[in-house]
Image: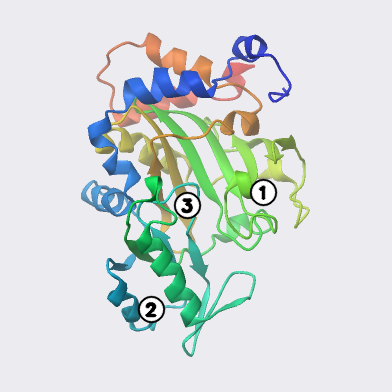
């Protein structure tokens, strides 16, 4: 299915959700403005997740003021690696990943050294709001490094893959694995060149892969066949995503999760305005799944029941 060259009416007939309809009928209708901080502020999301027994990456520290930047070397001295991210950032902007700390020197996934002065300047930019929604002053979160689960060896290049699940009214309706590449500088960001692999909601198996919105069969850097992938802990990931509905009280969400080698599935963040490229990665529109949920009307289904419903009705075989 080629989305980019089709007429809007043709896209609608294929069940493709467009930006205006997403913004009005789903984000605007289902996500109360008063709860946006729960997902837009990663520090608040982390605190909410812990309160709801949802595992997240470890918190090393928080830098709120310029003078606290000087505390970072002592903060990370005992760490093998760490991540610095803006609490209110979006689209992967402002995330600094350090995979090796050695004698006070820091190294990125590609082996490039990052000097302490560069770290200070980066955090200063975070605090000034350079990477934040609306450009407002922010705080910098220093997190423990996520250790690459070996199940993804060859599927990602110099970065940790993440799993995006769209959750509508508590139902996981569409999934995608995002794999970093040399073009994306080790970040799982599709707009920067990461690979998106559509994942079967029923099984966690790969269905279809794209890079820069174009279909591909093999990872551009490792030559690994992409649809051979099968995400482990799939049921656990579906349940975690479903739980974020009650946690956030928002009806239309993107949930981003990772698999840590030692800790297993971890919730990275939530997104109240999830992008639409997940449909390209899955080679199908998301609207039929959203309509299916709406037809259920008001319901009192548990997390377990919602997950089982999603696996049955939104799996690949059910939509052929």
In the rendered image, which quarter contains the C terminus?
top right
Residue denoted by label 2: 76
Determine the CA span between mark 3 and mark 1: 19 Å
Residue at mark 2 to residue at mark 3: CA–CA distance: 22 Å
Residue most extreme to the bottom: 103
Mark 3 — residue?
A: 258
Counting other residues with Cα less than 10 Å from the Cα at mark 2, is it few (<14), some (14-19), or many (20 or more)? Answer: some
Nearer-N-terminus badge (1/2) = 2
List the residue tagged with mark 1.
193
Q: Are marks 3 and 1 in contact (CB under 8 Å)?
A: no
Q: Position of residue 76 (x, y in %)?
A: 38, 78
Q: Which mark is residue 203?
A: none
* Labelled pair 2, 3 in contact (Cβ < 8 Å): no
Total marks placed: 3
Q: Is residue 65 above or below residue 287?
A: below
Q: Position of residue 260 (x, y in %)?
A: 47, 59
Which residue is drawn at the image coordinates 42% and 40% (left, top)?
255
Nearer the N terminus, badge 2 or badge 3?
2
**Measured from the top left, where is residue 181 in percent x and y?**
67, 55
Question: In the image, what residue occupies the spot 39% across and 46% down?
Answer: 133
93 and 170: which is toward the camera: 93
x 27%, y 28%: residue: 32
């Amino acid at each position: 299915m080629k989305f980019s060259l089709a007429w809007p009416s043709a896209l609608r007939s294929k069940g493709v959700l467009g930006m205006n309809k997403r913004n009005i009928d789903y984000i605007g209708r289902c996500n109360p403005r008063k709860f946006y901080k729960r997902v837009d502020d990663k520090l608040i999301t982390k605190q909410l997740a812990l309160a709801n027994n949802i595992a997240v990456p470890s918190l090393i520290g928080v830098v709120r003021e310029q003078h606290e930047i000087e505390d970072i070397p002592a903060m990370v001295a005992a760490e093998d690696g760490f991540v610095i991210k803006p609490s209110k950032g979006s689209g992967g902007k402002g995330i600094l990943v350090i995979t090796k700390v050695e004698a006070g020197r820091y190294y990125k996934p590609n082996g490039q050294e990052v000097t302490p002065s560069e770290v200070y300047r980066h955090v200063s930019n975070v605090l000034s709001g350079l990477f934040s929604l609306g450009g407002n002053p922010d705080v910098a979160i220093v997190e423990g490094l996520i250790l690459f689960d070996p199940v993804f060896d060859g599927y990602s290049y110099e970065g940790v893959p993440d799993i995006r699940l769209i959750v509508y009214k508590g139902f996981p309706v569409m999934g995608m694995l995002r794999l970093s590449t040399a073009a994306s500088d080790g970040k799982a960001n599709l707009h920067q060149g990461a690979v998106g692999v559509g994942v079967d909601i029923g099984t966690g198996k790969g269905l279809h892969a794209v890079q820069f919105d174009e279909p591909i069969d093999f990872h551009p850097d490792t030559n690994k066949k992409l649809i051979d992938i099968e995400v482990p802990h799939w049921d656990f990931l579906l349940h975690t995503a479903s739980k974020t509905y009650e946690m956030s009280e928002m009806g239309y969400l993107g949930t981003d999760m990772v698999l840590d080698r030692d800790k297993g599935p971890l919730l990275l963040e939530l997104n109240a305005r999830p992008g639409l490229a997940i449909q390209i990665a899955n080679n199908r529109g998301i609207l039929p799944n959203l309509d299916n949920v709406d037809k259920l009307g008001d319901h009192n289904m548990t997390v377990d029941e919602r997950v089982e419903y999603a696996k049955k009705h939104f799996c690949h075989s059910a939509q052929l």
